[in-house]
């Protein structure tokens, strides 16, 4: 193997080896640049499909008891629910 490499590169000068090294580095850099541009283009083309966050306010009634509830959802996932009793005398949230 060593004899083959010596035979192939026996007439090469330092400038030719430097040129080969530069060509290889430029090829690797170009490939990386094209891959980066492709990934950025793919990300832009596919979009950022994030689910929307919604807040729902409702009054739940169980018999004579009323509760004011707030529900926060992301897509179909419920993130948080908070319920407060409604005072039957004032109609406001009980403290």
Image: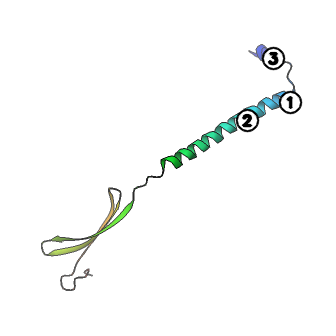
The label shown at residue 63 is: none
Q: Secondary structure at mark 2?
A: helix
Q: Please tell me how crowded label 3 is: few (under 14), some (14-19), or many (20+) other residues with Cα within 10 Å.
A: few
Count of labels in the image: 3
For marks 2 and 3, give the one nearer the viewer. 2
Q: Is residue 65 above or below residue 2?
A: below
- Residue 67: x and y, percent? 22, 73
The answer to the question of whether label 2 and label 1 lie on touching residues, with beta carbons closer than 8 A, is no
Give residue 89's quadrant in the image.
bottom left
In this picture, residue 13 sits left or right of residue 22? right
Instruction: Name the residue carrying label 2.
Output: 25
**How far apart in space, not on screen, are marks 1 and 3 (Cα)?**
17 Å
Is residue 47 or residue 51 the one in the foreground?
A: 47
Mark 1 or 3, nearer chain start: 3
- Residue 79: x and y, percent? 34, 61
Instruction: Name the residue carrying label 3.
Output: 6
The quarter of the image holding the C terminus is bottom left
Q: What residue lies at 77% left-to-right and 17% top-to-bottom?
A: 5
Mark 2 or 1, nearer chain start: 1
- Residue 14: x and y, percent? 86, 28
Q: What residue lies at 87% left-to-right and 25% top-to-bottom?
A: 13
Going by the picture, which residue comes out furthest to the front? 45
Instruction: Name the residue carrying label 1.
Output: 15
In this picture, residue 18 sits left or right of residue 81? right
Q: Secondary structure at mark 3?
A: helix
- Residue 28: x and y, percent? 68, 35
Q: Is residue 28 above or below residue 83?
A: above
């Amino acid at each position: 193997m060593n004899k083959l490499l010596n035979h192939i590169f026996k007439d090469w000068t330092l400038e030719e080896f430097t040129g080969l090294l530069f060509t290889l580095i430029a090829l690797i850099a170009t490939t990386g640049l094209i891959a980066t541009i492709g990934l950025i283009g793919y990300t832009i083309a596919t979009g950022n499909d994030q689910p929307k966050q919604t807040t729902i306010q409702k009054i739940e009634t169980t018999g004579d008891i009323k509760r004011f509830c707030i529900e926060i959802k992301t897509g179909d996932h419920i993130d948080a629910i908070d319920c407060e009793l409604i005072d039957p005398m004032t109609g406001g949230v009980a403290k």
